[in-house]
Amino acid sequence: MECVRKLTNDLYWVGADDRRLALFENIHPIPRGVSYNSYLLLDEKTVLFDTADWSVCKQFLENVEGVLKGRKLDYLIINHVEPDHAASIEEVLLRHPETTVISNEQAFTLMDQFGYRVEGEKQIVVKEGDTQKFGKHTIAFVAAPMVHWPEAMVSFDLTTGTLFSADAFGSFGALGGRIFNDEVDFDRDWLDDARRYYTNIVGKYGPFVMDLLGKASQLDIKMICPLHGPVWRNNIKYIVDKYIHWATYEPEEKGVLLVYASMYGNTESTASVLAAKLAEKGMTNIAMYDVSKTDISYLISDAFKYSHLVLASVTYNLGIYPKMLNFLEDMKALNLQKRIVGIIENGSWACTVGGLMTEFLENNMKAMTVLQDGVTINSRMTGGQERSMNDLVDGILNSMKEA
Ligand SMILES: Cc1cc2nc3c(=O)[nH]c(=O)nc-3n(C[C@H](O)[C@H](O)[C@H](O)COP(=O)(O)O)c2cc1C
């Protein structure tokens, strides 16, 4: 049975949810599943926007046929060739040999590389600024390079103001029938997954996202149809504002992400002392994680969210504790910048980790301000470190006031 949603009088969602996949891109846990969105326009010509992952291909094809109701499929527009969207191209073309595929040159090259064969005469190659009329609807094509693949483009319906945004504005999370942003409590149920999706998958490419947002600001966008997650049919400023924060690496909130690396609990309890002292002074917007047992995608997401970061780590064989080093490397890889950082270091005989983390932040990342007042403990915290702990607390709070 097809499972579709009608978005407007002639536009349908024909995608599908995947709740079986455990790791998106075989990296990021998706406990709430993920949706692979595809859209079908029934104008004088019929137009399918992107396909869906192989895992939901049968449901997706059933949805397409359920909406076509025997009509031909005239066009397939491919905005993005990543297999979670393009893997079903061949199955569509096998069932619809009449279809012409519209995409850009680099996308066709990638389709060929992935074996999504589209015969030359069935291709229309477009570039930035090209348009295509399908009856009432005219679609304009806008390049969106590195959001997050080089071939990515978005398609804008000049007639209705609908932006088919590829992976931009996407989110982890299965839709469960509720396709529109105003059919869910987005802040409560979706924002964390939208941030975790963006920061871990697109986060590195902030400047490219800003280029796309610059182009989008010239368009009168009325609805956003992303390839994952809810369709935005109102309150578009809200999600664009989130994207501007994330793409410019500006924190969303004044608060503290407190990440500790501890093997026997002493560094953890020192981190808890910091959290308690911050809370006592009224700063309760704190997210605290054990770096060893928290999936790194959640740490990255909160590192984009909060203004301040505290890294509390053991020294490990004269180096940075491996799991903490992974986190630092991932923040660097995703271009995170513009954060104020507090350091707590622990060592029992040769404590080096504080200096090493400071060096990493200052030498490898942009605009990371490491607070002067760090805390050094030898095996476990004692009263002797109370003063430096209080200085760290004040350093965090004063820098929050100045920010
Ligand atoms: C495998 C291992 C290697 C360590 N290497 C160092 C080191 O090179 N220098 C040092 O001062 N302490 C070292 N330590 C001690 C830790 O940095 C830390 O002081 C101790 O684990 C207590 O902190 P915790 O309870 O948070 O784990 C090491 C501990 C372990 C278990």
Image: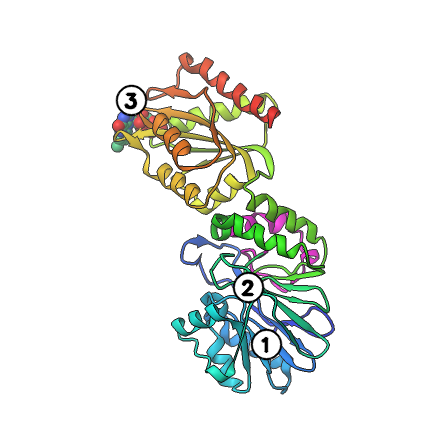
Location of residue 115 by image quarter: bottom left
Pair 1/2: label in front = 2
Location of residue 25 by image quarter: bottom left
Q: Does the magenta stretch include residue 170?
A: yes
Q: How far apart are marks 3 and 2 (CA)?
A: 54 Å
Q: Which amino acid does label 3 sit on?
A: Ser
Q: Where is residue 403 in the image (x, y as percent from the top left)?
A: 60, 28
- Rendered-image quarter of ligand 1: top left
Return the residue nearer the eye: 16 or 357: 357
Disc 3, disc 2: CB below 8 Å? no
Q: What stretch is highlighted in magenta?
A: 169-198
Sequence order check, earlier mark of 1 and 3: 1
> Compared with residue 140, is residue 237 higher up or lower down, i.e. above or below?
above
> Compared with residue 164, is residue 375 higher up or lower down, i.e. above or below?
above
User: Residue tagged by mark 3?
Assistant: 348
Residue at disc 1, secondary structure: helix
Return the residue nearer the eye: 71 or 259: 71
**Mark 1 surroundings: few (<14), some (14-19) or many (≥20) residues within 10 A:** many
> Compared with residue 151, is residue 333 higher up or lower down, i.e. above or below?
above
Q: Which amino acid does label 2 sit on?
A: Met
Q: Which residue is drawn at 50% across and 67% down?
A: 85
